[in-house]
Image: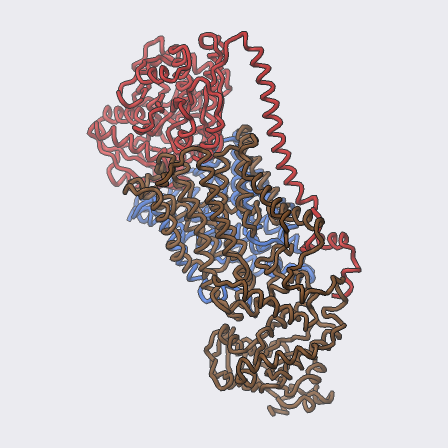
Chain colours: A blue, B brown, C red
Amino acid sequence: MTLLLQTIFSSLVNGSVYALIGVGIVLCYRSSRIVNLAQGETYMVSGVLTAKMVGWGDPLWLSALAGVAAAIVGSVLFERLVLRSRLDWDPSRLIIVTVGVAILAEGIADRLIGGDELSFLPILTGNSLIVDGAAISPQGLLLIGTTVTITGALILFFRSTLLGHAMTAVAENPRVSGLLGINAGRMRMLSFGMAGLLGGISALLVVPESGTGYNVGLPLTLNGFAAAAFANMVSPARALGAAMFLAIAEGLVGSYLNTSLETPLVFGVLLIAGVMYLGRGQRFAGAARA
Amino acid sequence: MSALAAGRTRGPALGLAGVVVAVLALAAVIALPAYGIPRLTLNLAADVCFFGIACTGINLLLGYGGMLSLGSAGFVGTSAYTVALTTTHWHWPLLPAILAGIALSLVLAAVVGLILVRLSQHYFAVAYLGLATAFAGLITAYPTATGGTSGLTTLRDLNLGFATVDTNFGWYVVALVCVAIAVAVFQWAVAGRRGRIFKLVRADALVASVLGVHTFRTRLGLFVLSAFFPALAGALLFPFEGLITPDTVGSVESVQLVALVIIGGVGYSYGGFVGALIILWIQALVDTAGNYSLLVYGVVFLLCAFYLRAGVGGAIKQGVETLVGRVRAGSHDPDLRVVSEEPRTPAPRSAVDESSTGPPRDEIAPVMAKLSEHGEHRARAGLEVSGARRHFGGVVAVDDVSLTLKPGTITALIGSNGAGKSTLVNIISGVERLDHGSITLAAQDISTMPPAERTRMGIARTFQVPRLVEELSVLDNVMLGREAGEASVWWRSRKREREHAVTALRRLHSAGLSHLQNRQVRTLGTGERKFVELVRALDEEPAVCLLDEPAVGLSLEEIEHLQGWIERLRAAGAAVLVIDHNLDFVQRLADFVYVMDVGRIVRSGPPEELLGTREARGSLLDPARGPA
Amino acid sequence: MQDREQVLSEREENKVSRKFGIWREESSRRLSLRSVLPVAAVTALAVGGAASAGVTAAAASTAHAKKKASKTPWVIGSLVDVTGTDAAGGAAQKAGITYYIDQVNKAGGIHGHKLKLKFCDTQSIPTAAAQCAQQLTGVNSHIVLAQSIDPPTRGALPYLGKDLVVAVDPVLMPTSSEKNVFQATGAGQVVAQALVNGVKAAHLHTIGVLYTSDTSGTNQLAAAQKVAQAAGLTVVSQSQNPGSTDVTPQLVQLRSSGAQVIYLASVGTNTAAAVNSYATLGMSQPLVVGAANVTDGFLHLVSKIPPHMFGVSQLLQDHTGLKPSAIRVFDAYLKSFKTTMHEPADTQTTSAVYDGCVAADALKSVNGTSVSRLEKYFKTHQITCLGSNMRFNLPGFNVITGQPASLAEAGSSATSGWGPVRGKL
């Protein structure tokens, strides 16, 4: 029982990380139909800046603010300078552009901090919550809670606010939305900014657990992408669910079979089965209707 | 950009001088390692070759299949590890091991493809990525067999039986031979008809299946073929590097391979090689910079991704074309000179050449002759729809609709938007299934026939918004109408292609469109596109023509031309169905009119009765009148 | 369709198109600046590279002409993961070797020959290592220093010709076919030996190993298992995926399998994650981290340092078994390193220093660069570095073992920041 509970706790923590990145990717996709594989770099930038500032002696709250702000600014600049003028490009090519930006970010970080691995203190310290021998730290609980809250807020935002509807409209059809008076560029900027915020927050909560370096972005992104794909790239709720599902599946396989088999089994079998299920009923490879 | 259109039946006639220049240029490129360029060693060149080969598979799949392969390193790995395991554990000689590696990868690709190919773009990308990650994970999970994270090693020689390759130069030669094989296979795969069909399936799978292509089989075939390249590269990479580890074959490697292709230029057979050369060389160069290497790599990568839309390969091709274009005036295939004799005039005001008011008399006779050749039952075929019903969830789009299309008549179907007209046409052409009711063509029940079959039986249709392959030329699009459904995508006969090209050109000429033959569809306006689509649809002399809003977006002159065209169809004995909102047009043209509203036929009758007076038109949808 | 071709000139059209983000791909007969730019950049790089190569060649030849009077410098090659996943270790290695060779040169070199280092970035992957090894020309000392015998080094081996490779911090042993590879320090076995000695001294019998499923982790596990078995101890193990944030389930499993000591066979952020998970669980078993983590940097990675955390390292803090003279030399080295390099020495840099020391000693002893004599040296000799005796004790295995340490506490005046970690097992 202890092992099962512990596996679930651990998976919820891991899943929250995937979810935050995945929801970030969903946000970017909703507004621009671009798969943003540079999303993990917002996590990296934020984490590195915060850690560096803490290292220089600045208080945690200031460093955290700076880190999150850097992630938001970076994300917005990315949308504005890199993506906006290239929206008509072939999606595959745009994915590669985002990968290119991710590599560039890594390169810059490499120059700034080299191979150093950095970290800072968690926001919540204190005793873990122990249930039947299984433990979860206060920071872990904070992480899970924040993820769920943010996702819930986003769902409400998209469903019930005018701004949320406007953002969705822009993704569906930017030109028509423009004609209706919605500033597509501003909407996109806003959603990329929100994605940056998510990356920053996830760094704030997760880096104290495991540290960061210049190259942590891409692996995180790929996991988040899997969660987002399950969510058909547009649903934050489904992204959260998918992320948790993936993490729990991985955790169970790791605990009861073999950690090395986590990725093969989860990605290989479950993912494919999942996307098959989700992709059913699509004829003509999803081509537009006549 | 016209050169991008694959499978042109005619290419620029280079002449002997051109061939010599091309060969010299190629030789110069192959000899790159000999120039003493810093870091550009034989070893790097061989590496470029092998990576380029793996990239060519991605190139094929992306450029012609529209599928982003974020996991092809998995096939590199399958092949490499097969070679490694068979030679290390079971002591196979190298050559059979290589063949086994490639074969196993192809089998795996077929199995995996069955699942992946069905998926739409994002799911495909992520599933394929997941596969590569899973593969790397599996390798790590069974370290006793696979050497785990340390991998497997071997001596760096290639024992071919008749010779052993163990010098850098020898390996480079082997690499070049493999490059030649890879490029040859690529060219074969996209030659002529094949390339056109792949592009059609990629651009519009729906139209592809209407035109008779087995889209699933085609995409699966392309997927499996594209796995050949990484498999070949992987099989040779193991003896070449003397080492194979899981990080060579995981997700990050796969993404990097895609990056190489994008930089090099998607769709060009040498794209992967150009990309590999640039990036691998730059990486080797900046190694001296040590700490700056990643940064420089990122910058170069991004620059290429930004500014070279068609990759470096595309820029090179453009440059070459500019040069070549300045040297020669234009290109005409000597055999086709007969049809493309008109001097190049500037594009006229409207889509059609005003000088042609109708087809030359001598066009109708051969058409009639052809029809009688193919059997009169086709020309005389009538289409009957009875009790058709189709619903989407709770919405009934087509509700108990019955209509008849008689041969040699023009039937019009009018109604407000959302009435179900297009859905009905979709049902007749087979794109939508029928929930209830039946459709018969020449007394044969075709209700459950797939769209390709119906096309073969003589049903042709056009779409509300013309669905053509943007990147191909007008001529290529028209040829597809005829050749797409002929046989499997792998079959090709140059003779048949020539015939199709001639026929297509004749049709374009009779439609007054031959001045557009080489234009990319992307550059055409609505009217032109509508006419091109018509030519494509009518290329097979159909028995039943379903025209969905053909007049929308056309100018007055074009509508006149269209009218003449449809009347000629009637004269040839086809049963034509026209949907349109232009009531004058309908009144002039139609022999019989159906009015549809909210999924039902509410009125029907001759056009004078329904559309003759303003009063009649006003009360078309009046429930009091009731169905005729 | 109307007169649009005549209404707008092509340039205006392009301007309009660009503004609305619409590109119309006419077969343009013009190479735009945008497509030429990166090609130009690449060409410029190429020309620049060639030019600088030419410039350096010219400079080298003049320098060479000048040096004809003094003796030719001996160039030692070095394979380092400057970038890639193992960049952290690579940086430390580079610092260590550079420091030591600089010290040697300051003291006048070896028999009048100055020592030069030539680095190449193996980028943590075999293919890049192969490329850079090819560029490692001019290593006239025939000695190449490597981080460890991991995949990148293996990738480079075939291209190093007759040069002898001395590995710094090996966790892997060279295979019998790798005849030109020698290990400078036996960190893998040594750490395991130290661990086992400590465990036995504390009268415990079951070691729980949490290892990362990558090369370094699996091999640290293998070393631990081998040594523990020989000493009659039990080893239970769990693997963690590199990059995982939370490994509490694995620790729970180790705990329930009866582990009395937890050994973390991992490096850097992976170890930090494990330590944080350990703290979350509030476990009380002693926690041991390997040599590579006995660094300042690592301590800053951990949010809460557990009370019973120990590090195994060649940096002897209680100096057990060392002669006083050796202790003085060692402490002097630590001080000097800090002054020169502006950062404290840690295990990895010190391992690299040992490596440089071995190379220098070999060249001194052989008084030349003959491969066969160097080879003989590596197989048979005993040397003293930084006050520690280093000698071969496993014949036929090409290994030079370093000074085995007892399970020392990782905290001392020499490396500041270790504060709370105290006490013996």
Look at 57% across and 18% down and name the residue there.
C60
Residue A145 visible in this rendered orientation of the protein: no
Quadrant of the rendering where the C terminus of chain B is positioned: bottom right
Q: Residue C391, how many percent across, how many down? A: 31, 16
Q: Residue C57, how many percent across, how many down? A: 58, 21
Tell me which corner region of the image, top left, top right, bottom left or bottom right, holds residue B306.
top right
Q: How many marks?
A: 0
Left or right? Give the position of B429 relative to B350. left
Nearest to the observer: residue B455 or residue C238: B455
Nearest to the observer: residue A248 or residue B8: B8
Against A236, residue B561 (above or below) is below
Quadrant of the rendering where the N terminus of chain B is positioned: bottom right
Left or right? Give the position of A107 relative to B50. right
Residue A289 visible in this rendered orientation of the protein: yes
Tell me which corner region of the image, top left, top right, bottom left or bottom right, holds residue C408.
top left
Going by the picture, which residue comes out furthest to the right? Answer: C7
Nearest to the observer: residue B468 or residue A287: B468
Q: Residue A133, how many percent across, how many down? A: 30, 44
Going by the picture, which residue comes out furthest to the front? Answer: B16
Tell me which corner region of the image, top left, top right, bottom left or bottom right, holds residue B166.
top left
Going by the picture, which residue comes out furthest to the left? Answer: C232
Nearest to the observer: residue B197 or residue C394: B197
Left or right? Give the position of C210 relative to B579. left
Look at 68% across and 67% down and name the residue there.
B514
Against B51, residue C160 (above or below) is above
Against C139, residue B185 (above or below) is below
Q: Residue C405, how many percent across, how many down? A: 31, 20
